[in-house]
Amino acid sequence: MYRYIQKWFLKVWYSQNRWYLFFIPLSCLFYLLSTSRRWFYKNGLLRRYKAKYPVIVIGNITVGGTGKTPIVIWIANYFISIGYKPAIISRGYSGKVGSNPIEVSGCSDVRLVGDEALMIAIKSDCPVIIHPDRVLALKYLAGRDIDLVISDDGLQHYKLHRDYEIVTVDGQRMFGNNRLLPAGPLRESISRLDSVDTVLIQKETTGYNQVGDFYLDGKYAINLISGEVRAFEKFLDKNVHAIAGIGNPERFFRFMTNKGFNVTQHHFEDHRQYSLKDITFNDELNVFMTEKDMTKCQDFNNEKLWYVPVDVVINDSNIKWLNDIKYILDKGYK
């Protein structure tokens, strides 16, 4: 039922559907509550927690996938590569975090820590701490030898002081009908982008050169059972199943199609906890999935399962925003 409700709202938000008018009163209430809360923090009526090291927040102003988590991983690995020691904090969405923060490793139970946090831990060589209260997650890092903290999501978590804000935007869906929740997909008004430090727009091809644009690219798949790494062109049968339980499944399906596969699509809700039945089909075709989906399918004994690792590619020769972050690191905290 949840999947159908989700699909219905997406149709309302990203088409010329006038059902959004029914939710306008609720959107007005949402606007009053969210803007009042931000004003209280901005003007010191509610207190923010300031860490001893810079905090970089990567978030979005819309519901759904915008490439935020891959950017978190890319930034963490970039700063590791140039000698810094980052840590990542995250909500641990879809996990079962209790009253205390949890440190995530590549061996953590996905049912406990959530799929996104596990994927981050697998793909980044730095501490990953999860808790719905980002301040508690940050305090858990006290005494660690780190240079900066990267917050996966948390743009609207104003209790946490931040030194740099990055917003990722889906370059195709953009802001839908430009309405606030629940009439539209916006968590905050579009004007919020005027106050952040950097906006990164996710594209789907390499044919864009605007500053700040990025896209996700992959060239091979990995078998969940054998660990075999196989380039896309080595798959003799291009007819495949593709499953996706992510914020924007259509993007993955288009990616696979653009790589030359004939895809039978299987949509699932974001953060789906799969059963083997969900991804077993009555044929001999291979089944492709995202890295995020893979974290919940590792124990399934099906040699037809493959996942597709992707990397962030930045369309910016200068990457000025990275230099701005390094300036904050070197000048303000060292």
Image (cartoon, grey):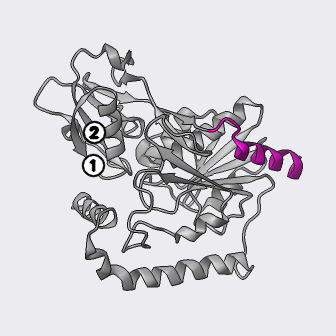
Which of the pair 273/176 is nearer the observer?
176
Neighbourhood count class around disc 2 (C-alpha, 10 Å): few under 14, some 14–19, many 20 upward: many
258 relative to 50 in the view: left or right: left
Say which amino acid is labelled 1. Answer: Phe
State the residue in front, 41 or 22. Answer: 22
**Quadrant location of residue 35?**
bottom right
Residue bearing the label numbered 1: 268
Identified by mark 2, the residue type is: Ile
Task: Confirm whether the magenta stretch covers residue 323.
Answer: yes
Q: Which residue is mark 2?
A: 243
Tell me if residue 154 is in the magenta stretch.
Answer: no
Residue 8 in percent (x, y) is at: 25, 64
Q: Considering only order in the chain, which callout, 2 or 1, is on the residue closer to the N terminus?
A: 2
Q: Are marks 1 and 2 in contact (CB under 8 Å)?
A: yes
Q: Quadrant of the N terminus?
A: bottom left
Q: Quadrant of residue 47?
A: bottom right
Residue 184: quarter of image:
bottom left
